[in-house]
Image: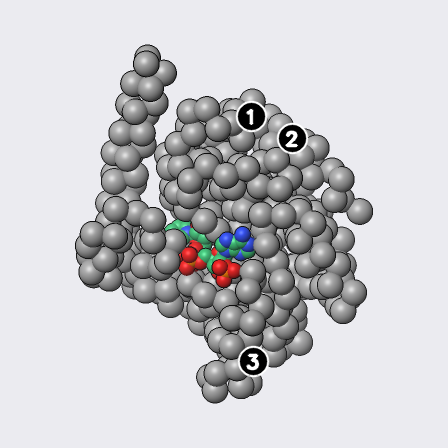
Amino acid sequence: MIQFVLNSLKIIQYQILYYFLGFFAIIDDLKNREHNKFNIVSKRGKVAVITGGARGIGLEVVKKLAQCGMHIIIGCRNIEAGQKIFQQQIFSDVSIEIYELDLKSFTSVSRFAQKILFRHNQVHLLINNAGVMFVPYEKCEDGYEAHWTINYLSHFLLTELLLPVLKTSGSNNENARIINVSSCAHEASPLIDFDKISKRKGYIPTAAYAKSKLAQLISTKYYDKKLSNSNVQVLAVHPGIVDTELFNGTLLKKTMPWILRYICKTPEEGSRCITYACVSPKLEGHGGYYANCQSVKNLPYADDDKIQLELYNTSKVMVEHFLM
Ligand SMILES: NC(=O)c1ccc[n+]([C@@H]2O[C@H](COP(=O)([O-])OP(=O)(O)OC[C@H]3O[C@@H](n4cnc5c(N)ncnc54)[C@H](OP(=O)(O)O)[C@@H]3O)[C@@H](O)[C@H]2O)c1
């Protein structure tokens, strides 16, 4: 009974926190609208890999990278649906490959990486974009909770598998880049309780989403430091509060979807800062955390060297069977 009351209080606490974070993030998006701009940069001949590129913000990122002339490799769950999207006239000039990727499964991540490495000896850009939000408790096939697996750990595995090719694809003139699509929601997670990551007991979807986004940010900071002497840089982006299917499970989208249309960014607006992080020459040599095409502050917890190393080592153990 006490446990139930404590959990209910925690759920309310997270709910309130999210309303505050969401409110201030929307104000921030409105205030910085003029900065949220993206200029096309020619990247002809370069290869980009993106997870979740067939809808939502990811699809808009793909359109922009295509305008830059990149060859784009998309990972998505339903290849037929993805292929249908890219058969449309507007994509006729886009150089694209689509492969199956289910981030709930490390085997699927590993197969996706193998297909890329089999066909390409260069990858210049990796965008870890796909994600889920506030989903009910689920243990994925490798034993970890769904937010943790889809948003963070599978992307960690994909990063590790593609890192060797990213390292050789970057040059002294132009780094390869890894972009992790995080969120201001990371601020709702005070810490990562490594012992409780995938526990069903006391599971709160809002807390699980925040934790997975915090992990992405910590990992960004760690890799950017670790790779400082190689030709790879790592950035995290908060795309803004964007009206996409990510909100489908929320009360707001179920009851008043029109509100989101008015107060949120469109997916196209949400894709600008991600694409800016991918290609802007201004960011050459700079990692960090960005929103509205500007460097922004993250929770200081994400900058803690000890936490970064603990997350890296823990993650490596979690995926060790799939590292080649
Ligand atoms: N929308 C916002 O306000 C907001 C704010 C901050 C951060 N973000 C972040 O932005 C990213 C994109 O979100 P969005 O708003 O574009 O959401 P969305 O429209 O719901 O798209 C989610 C994407 O993730 C993919 N995905 C979900 N589960 C997957 C799985 N198991 N395996 C492979 N792919 C999977 C989906 O691919 P399928 O086509 O295969 O379903 C889809 O492409 C997420 O990381 C999200 O956390 C969004």
The kind of residue tagged 1 is: Phe
The kind of residue tagged 2 is: Thr
Q: Are marks 1 and 3 in contact (CB under 8 Å)?
A: no
Q: Does the residue labelled 2 lie within 8 Å of ligand 1?
A: no
Q: Is mark 1 within 8 Å of ligand 1?
A: no
Taking depth in this image into account, of 265 and 35 the one nearest to the observer is 265
Taking depth in this image into account, of 20 and 253 the one nearest to the observer is 253
Q: Do the residues labelled 1 and 2 touch (CB within 8 Å)?
A: yes
Q: Badge 2 is on which residue?
A: 314
Q: Badge 1 is on which residue?
A: 194
Crowding around mark 1 (Cα neighbors within 10 Å: few <14, some 14 to 19, many 20+) is: few
Q: Which mark is residue 282?
A: none
Please tell me whether residue 172 is drawn above or below residue 251 in the rendered image: below
Please tell me whether residue 241 is drawn above or below residue 48 in the rendered image: above
Crowding around mark 2 (Cα neighbors within 10 Å: few <14, some 14 to 19, many 20+) is: few
Q: Indicate the secondary structure of the residue bearing disc 3.
A: loop
Q: Badge 3 is on which residue?
A: 94
The residue drawn where x is 29% and y is 18% is 5
Label 2, label 3: how far apart the Cα atoms are: 39 Å
The kind of residue tagged 3 is: Val
Where does the image place residue 130, in percent across and percent down from the top left?
51, 55
Where does the image place residue 303, in percent across and percent down from the top left?
52, 33
Where does the image place residue 157, in percent across and percent down from the top left?
66, 46
Where does the image place residue 235, in percent across and percent down from the top left?
54, 50
